[in-house]
Amino acid sequence: MERTFIMIKPDGVQRGLIGDVIKRFETKGFTLVAMKFMAVSRELAEQHYDVHKERPFFQGLVDFITSSPVVAMVWSGEGVVASARKIIGATNPLTAEPGTLRGDFCIEVGRNLIHGSDAIETAQREIALWFSDAELVTWETHSKPWLSE
Ligand code: IDP
Ligand code: MG
């Protein structure tokens, strides 16, 4: 089953929005595979955002992600990577549609609440970076026949 990596960034944790974020993925019908509340090392933050290392905002982004704890998660479901990106909304919260997490809960790109993998291959890389195989839980929700035909 398809999986994606989702992280509630330090602003989401500090602002007490952990429950609101998790609720959106739960009520949509996706399945939680792994979750941990953690401080992020500089090394992990730099590896996670490696694709942006030449960008002017890179150091500030690494400073921010390591400044306060995050909630790292893996969610699974058919089409979860693209669907999670839609639930999250555009990178710039001011252009993110109302109804999306960024559209509803934040106002600046440097404090945009949440990360979600942008493609299936990216998700695989990010899940392996943040979680060990043993931390990924295999289980089946009792709602399965009420969510899928
Ligand atoms: P995404 O999170 O929607 O995938 P990316 O373009 O991959 O967006 O950028 C990664 C993260 O880097 C953003 O979520 C945001 O936190 C930060 N970022 C991107 N562009 C800027 C910028 O212009 N200024 C400050 N931070 C930025
Ligand atoms: Mg991205």
Image: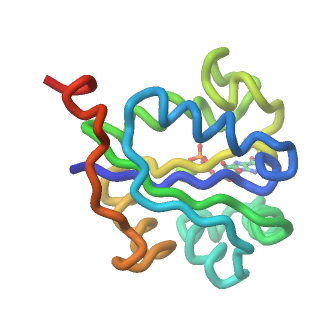
**Residue sitting nearer the eye, 49 or 131:** 131
Q: How many marks?
A: 0
- At 31% from the left and 42% from the top, the residue drawn is 141
Display colour scheme: rainbow
Q: Is 129 located above or below residue 138 in the figure?
A: below
Q: Is 33 located above or below residue 36 in the figure?
A: above
> On the image, which quarter does residue 111 sit in?
top right
Residue 71 appears left or right of 67: left
- At 71% from the left and 45% from the top, the residue drawn is 18
Q: Residue furthest front?
A: 142
- At 46% from the left and 74% from the top, the residue drawn is 131
- At 48% from the left and 35% from the top, the residue drawn is 26
Q: Residue furthest top?
A: 98
Residue 103 appears left or right of 89: right
Q: Residue furthest bottom?
A: 43
Residue 2 appears left or right of 73: left
> On the image, which quarter does residue 102 sit in?
top right
Q: Is 90 located above or below residue 76 in the figure?
A: above
Residue 40 appears left or right of 107: left
Q: Give how far across and how far down residue 81 sits, in percent.
A: 37, 43
Q: Give how far across and how far down residue 84 sits, in percent.
A: 46, 37
Q: Give how far across and how far down residue 106 sits, in percent.
A: 80, 32
**Residue sitting nearer the eye, 58 or 69:** 69
**Residue sitting nearer the eye, 76 or 56:** 76
Q: Is 134 located above or below residue 149 in the figure?
A: below
| Quadrant position of the C terminus in the picture | top left
Q: Give how far across and how far down residue 101 sits, in percent.
A: 65, 30
